[in-house]
Amino acid sequence: LQQALHSHLDNIPPETRTGELMGEFGRLYEQQYAVALFNKMRFDIEGGGGPQNQLLHRKVPLKNKSIFSGALFQYLEENKKWRNRFLFIPDSYNINYYENKQAHDRGLHPKGTINCAGYRVLTSMEEYLELLNTSLPGVKAKVGSSPFLKCATQFPLILWHPYARHYYFCVVTEKEQQKWNAVFQDCVRHTNNGLPEECKVQTPAFTDAVRLYRQAHGHYGTWEMMCGTPPQILANLVMETLLPEMRDLITPKLKGKMYERQRNWMLISDAVYGLVQSQTQAQYEAVVQSCEAGRPPLETTIRTDMDQIITSKEHVTSKIRTLVLPKAEKLLKVSIQPYISSILDALMEPTSRGFFEVRDLFFRELVDMSKNLLNDDNKEKLGEHMEKISMLAFHPVKMQSCYEKVETLSLEGLQQRFDVSSPSVFVQRAQILMREQMDDAVYTFEQLLHQSLEGQEQEDFCKTIQRCQDRVIKKFDYDSSTVRKKFFREALLQIFIPYMLKQLTPSCSELPRFQELIFEDFSRFILVENISEEVVLHTVMKDIMMAVKEAAVQRRHNLYRDSIVLTNSDPNLHLLGENPPIDWAEEYGGGQEELDGENTGDPEVQKRRRMKQVVSMIQIEGNASVLPNESCLEVPAVDNIPEEKTEVRSDTSLSQKSEKQVPNGTKEDVNKNAVDDKPPTNRSILKEEESTTERSLQGTERTLQPKTHPQATQNVDEFVCSPADSPHPTIENPNS
């Protein structure tokens, strides 16, 4: 592979492309870093307005928690076999896979770790082939045929990435496939969520630099690969240009059958992507360190000359507004206003259904708990139930019904008119907001219930739960309305602003001359390009605000009107948010079960084993066949897969072929352990999972990440765009 890379990439070495991009990005980042620092310090002085959240927010939601673990089959490309692997998903949402469960329990390093940023989860070979066929021009696989593997069961799970390697898994039942799919989707959703909002300077500087770089190269609008860590995003930016060049150069040189060419191309792409990531990692860290080292003198200048900088910026803004505003208003009237209402409706319907489902799920869980406590009205049982409810927002199986509601979001026609690459940008952001709202509701309920029970020996738990529940539901309705209205404004900005900038840029070629109006000492904090974009944003914001306000007045989606403000409506409640986390199992007697190997001397292993898992394991019936940790299923060699056949052999023929290829005496084991006609069934899964301004223009990237801004008013929110969480069960091997 290394020889092939060197021979193929002599004309376009990745180092050259990475260096070119990082040079331009570094210049943009340094400019935007100074602007972001000024905006942050100005906001710290002036503050901002807006509605106050009614629900409490948990600071560390998954402390001492893991998401999920279990066994499934993984395809090993090196020997073309399906091997049973143990997967463990910690609170980082990275997927760690081990040789077996014992290797995990002993604290050994995993065989590999999957960071899911930029991946897609597929549950059929047809979906996979459709995406694979777009990777190489002229190399097409027949629908229904596998490129270089035959799935061991009819329930595959494939992690697909446009640049990195693909991962292949499969399970033996449809129910397992659905649950693993929910877990993997949550891992993707979490890692795609964006950059940390707490970094008030680095995050806006980075997102603005990436956005301006792409705009300089003709790419406006949403970008699906604005996900992961900054080095990953920069690597995606390099590959966006490098991959087509590689494809044109390498495709004619790839030899062999269709599936061999596809497989070799994937290996080359993955190797180059890894190389580019290592280069962007080092160069990005150097850029950030350089900017951070120069931060103290910048802060001194800003503190000393804040008023003069603001006055200078307002003077330049008035000049630029005179030039840009008439053109922007004309474009707005002709090309934007007719579409605001219909696009808002398309966003509101599925999003509101999703938030309604979150509310209903929260209500149902509490009602079920009350029913279960009717007969066992004691604190120990209450502790057991609350231990489960406390992690409800991070349970992907239970939250799946909520997430599915918003997946129906469709923005037909926007791809052509407004350069919206995919609705997934908005879907994932809405799902993250839904998860956050659920956790805020659960956490607020926990604190209220704990306060109500404090110092009381015996009480009617059902009545107490009812009182706390009603109180939280009212607060949830208000916060849900606030969050959704802000999401709608952000989404509309993300759709319209890039389009307007693309249309207006050619007619604003004289903008650079306004830089002469700025004092040299202030030129690092006032950029003409940023001011021009702010003028465009303010032009369209008025219409967007009016459209959302009219939607709230209609009450179609249970939105509160802007005139309803509940600021400081419950000051005593917010004092509870400073309390330490509640350990329901320990405090109310629902203690944790004894764990095997507690006598081990390794504290890390003990800690790993004590970690509470959000999603319970699937238990196997005692008489059912079990997937042993060392089982390995042979599959047909790729040479035996006809290239032109459109028919796919059934699972039965696959099993028969596998039997012929394994050594004598092992046929029975293979059939029993891997592709048994009677796969293991699930025993009781006990009560199983049932049921606004300078920074505003950053809303033209991957996902929408809300942020406040110095010049924001109470009626105008600011939007920072940044790239786009939890568990579910599987097969646990009793023998391990």
Image: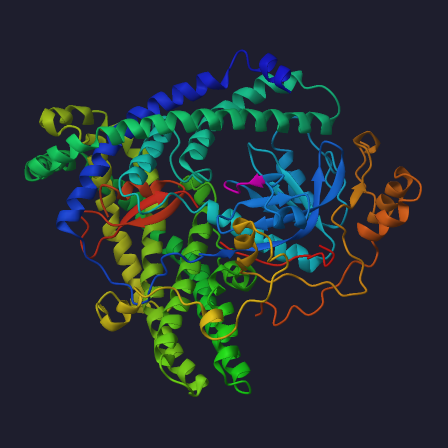
* Scheme by which the image is coloured: rainbow
Taking the spot 39% from the left edge, 53% from the top edge, the residue there is 343
Front-most of 453 and 637? 453
Give coordinates of residue 524: x percent, y percent: 17, 29
Q: Quadrant of the N terminus?
A: top right
Give the number of marks: 0
Is residue 555 something that shows in the picture?
no
196 shown above or below 289: below
**Residue 717: within the magenta?**
no
Span shown in magenta: 113-117
The picture places residue 634, in percent across and down from the top left corner, at 81, 40
Q: Is the residue 695 above or below the residue 519 in the image?
A: below
Instruction: Name the residue located 8 percent from the left edge and 27 percent from the top edge.
Output: 519
Q: Residue 586's spot in the image, x, y percent? A: 47, 70
**How would you classify the magenta stretch by its main secondary structure?**
loop
Q: Is residue 268 visible?
A: yes
Could you say which quadrant of the image residue 450 lies in?
bottom left
Return the residue found at the far right. Answer: 664
User: In the picture, residue 139 is in which quadrant?
Assistant: top right
From the viewer's side, name the closer residue of 158 and 491. 158
Residue 653 position within the rendered picture, expressed as x and y whole percent measured from the top left: 87, 45
Q: Quadrant of the C terminus?
A: bottom right
Q: Residue at x 10, y 38 (%)?
A: 303
Apparent side of residue 481 relative to residue 117 in the rendered image (left or right):
left
| Horizontal side, residue 147 vs residue 409: left or right | right
